[in-house]
Image (tube, rainbow, N blue to C red):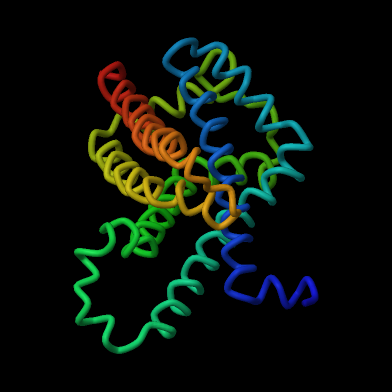
Amino acid sequence: MSNSGFIKSSVGRKVAMALSGFFLVFFLLQHLAINMLSILSPDLFNEVSHFMGTNPIVQFGLQPVLLFGVLFHLATGIILELQNKKARPVQYAYNKPETNSSWMSRNMVITGIMIMLFLGVHFYDFWIPEINAKFIQQDWSGTMDGVEGFRYFTELQHKMSDPFRSGIYTVAFVFLSLHLQHGFASMFQSMGLRHPKRTVMLEKIGKGYAIIIPALFIVIAWFHVLTSH
């Protein structure tokens, strides 16, 4: 089978989705580490944010790859779900799937779409203003009138000071947690890395990641709500 034929196959799509999932899992860790700096050290958060926001490798290399990875992961997930539904026999509806599989495994597309809707809000809050400042206004200084030093911490705290917005972020990260709880295990299964001797350990790592990472993002959001008033 050619490479294009492999990618178009169900197995090929699952492997490709798993690889994009691994990429996004590592990105979440990196994104969390930077955002945690906004709690631990606003000055360091500003410095790191400015470096990431002005580094040409990040801006013109990694950022487009990240955007493609997110869209590819969602599109592939929807295609696989449609293929699975088409391949299931009619009798599947009578087999009580709710007793044979978890809610997360049956609703990965729903949780994925909810996460994408949240990303739209997140892009509106942070990514689009950055694109406007750097590529339309041609301002790469990272500064803002009335703010001493870089503007990133001030902008973050201003956005996250709204409890309603932080509430939206909280709901989104709950959906992310649900998505990760099934997706983490699926990634290893699709890559053929699951083994009876490693299954328990992988399940513990996956569950821990799926709970701890979204929970810390929620902590960051509400920290800024509480400290900005």
**Residue plotted at (58% across, 48% down):** 193
The residue under the point 44% across, 54% down is 120
Number of dots carrying numbers? 0
Q: Choose between 149 and 14: the one closer to the eye.
A: 14
Residue 131 figure quarter: top right
Q: Position of residue 146 (x, y in %)?
A: 50, 19
**Residue 20 vs residue 30, the one in the foreground:** 20
Residue at x-position 32% and y-position 25%: 219
Q: Residue furthest front?
A: 197
* Nearer-the-camera pick, 111 or 194: 194
Quadrant in the picture for the N terminus: bottom right
- Locate residue 15, reporting x and y percent: 61, 60
Residue 150 vs 55, above or below: the answer is above
Q: Establish if 41 lies above or below 152.
A: above
Q: Locate the C terminus and report the quarter of the image it occupies.
A: top left
The residue lying furthest to the bottom in this view is 90
Residue 197: image x %, image y %? Answer: 49, 39
Closer-to-camera residue (91/127): 91
Which x, y percent locates residue 53? Answer: 66, 32
Q: Is residue 191 left or right of residue 180?
A: right
Up-down: is 229 above or below 109? above
Q: Which residue is drawn at 26% across and 86% down?
A: 91
Q: Within the image, what quadrant is residue 63 found in?
A: top right
